[in-house]
Amino acid sequence: MPRYSDEAQSHVNNDAKNRRKLLDQRRMEYRRAIESYAEHRQLQQQLVDYPELIAANYLAASQALGRQGARSGR
């Protein structure tokens, strides 16, 4: 009989560990999302001070996309 109670206890322990692990994973994903959002906002605020960088970045990106489109059209 003790064997069954040991198996049941280990099953309960495994379930609790799995729940904690899932909660930790969700918590870390949420934390990473918040940090990413904060970094993005900080970068945007820094770029507002330099509008010419935004325009140059836009032009470089649009030219790169134009070149990629020309290559795939061949």
Image (spheres, rainbow, N blue to C red):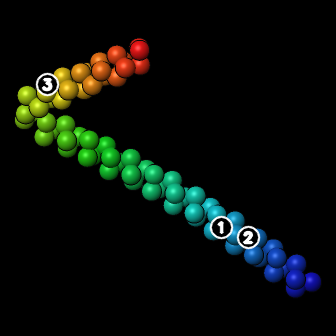
Q: Read off the residue under disc 2.
A: 12
Q: Residues within 10 Å of mark 1 (few under 14, many from 20)?
A: few
Residue in the foreground of this view, choosing between 14 and 61:
61
Disc 3 is placed on an element classified as helix
Q: Read off the residue under disc 1.
A: 16
- Name of the residue lying farthest toward the right: 1
Task: Determine the CA span between mark 2 and mark 1.
Answer: 6 Å
- Name of the residue lying farthest toward the bottom: 2
Disc 1 is placed on an element classified as helix
Q: Which mark is residue 52?
A: none
Where 55 sits versus 30, above or below? above
The picture quadrant where one finds residue 56 is top left
Where 55 sits versus 6, above or below? above
Q: Residues within 10 Å of mark 2 (few under 14, many from 20)?
A: few
Disc 2 is placed on an element classified as helix
Residue type at mark 1 is: Ala
Residue type at mark 3 is: Ala
Q: Which mark is first along the chain, 3 or 2?
A: 2
Q: Residue at x 76, y 70 (%)?
A: 11
Q: Residue at x 18, y 29 (%)?
A: 57
Q: Quadrant of the C terminus?
A: top left
Task: Determine the CA span between mark 2 and mark 3.
Answer: 59 Å
**Residue contact at pointers 2 and 1, CB within 8 angstroms:** yes
Q: Which mark is first along the chain, 3 or 1?
A: 1
The picture quadrant where one finds residue 60 is top left
| Residue 7 position within the rendered picture, expressed as x and y whole percent measured from the top left | 82, 76
